[in-house]
Image (tube, rainbow, N blue to C red):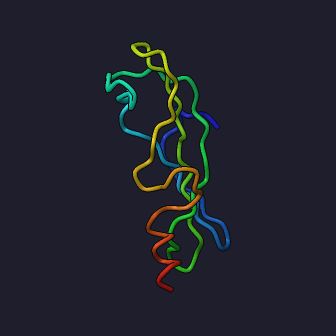
Amino acid sequence: MNPEEPESFTEEENKITLKLRFLQDEITCPHCNTHGGKLKQNRPILIRDLSVFGKIVYLNTPRRQFYCQHCQRHFTEKLPFVDWERRYTQRYEEWVFWV
């Protein structure tokens, strides 16, 4: 999968997959707070989200890893809607808990 491809979606019999992209190319280093980490790799991951129209929804989300030239450390971008090392959104987790 090419990370430069625009966002899109695919629909199957019981599943919808939304391909997402980030609007900003640069990020702030969580170690030294310097802006402009260099993108080292991008590995998309599938994240389960709330169902829509009776179909399972997955978010095909970039998982970007950066290198900070200032502090010389690598870091992985945190996604605000997914807890670390989870494969489902926070809202899906809340829905499962309350159902």
Residue 33 at x, y percent in the picture: 32, 26
Front residue of this view, candidates 9 and 58 = 58
Residue 48 at x, y percent in the picture: 57, 63
- Relative placement, left or right, of 16 versus 68 is right
> Residue 22: in sight, yes or no?
yes
Q: On the rendered image, what quadrant is the N terminus found in?
A: top right
Task: Name the residue located 67 percent from the left edge and 72 percent from the top edge.
Answer: 13
Residue 17 at x, y percent in the picture: 58, 59
**How many numbered discs, if any?**
0
Front residue of this view, candidates 52 and 36 = 36
Task: Name the residue located 63 percent from the left edge and 68 percent from the top edge.
Answer: 15
Residue lying farthest to the bottom in this orientation: 99
Task: Name the residue located 44 percent from the left edge and 47 percent from the top edge.
Answer: 79
Front residue of this view, candidates 21 and 76 = 76
Q: Is residue 88 above or below residue 39?
A: below
Residue 30 at x, y percent in the picture: 38, 32
- Relative placement, left or right, of 42 versus 23 is right
Q: Is residue 68 above or below residue 54?
A: above
Task: Name the residue located 53 percent from the left edge and 78 percent from the top edge.
Answer: 96
> Residue 25: in sight, yes or no?
no
Residue lying farthest to the right in this orientation: 13
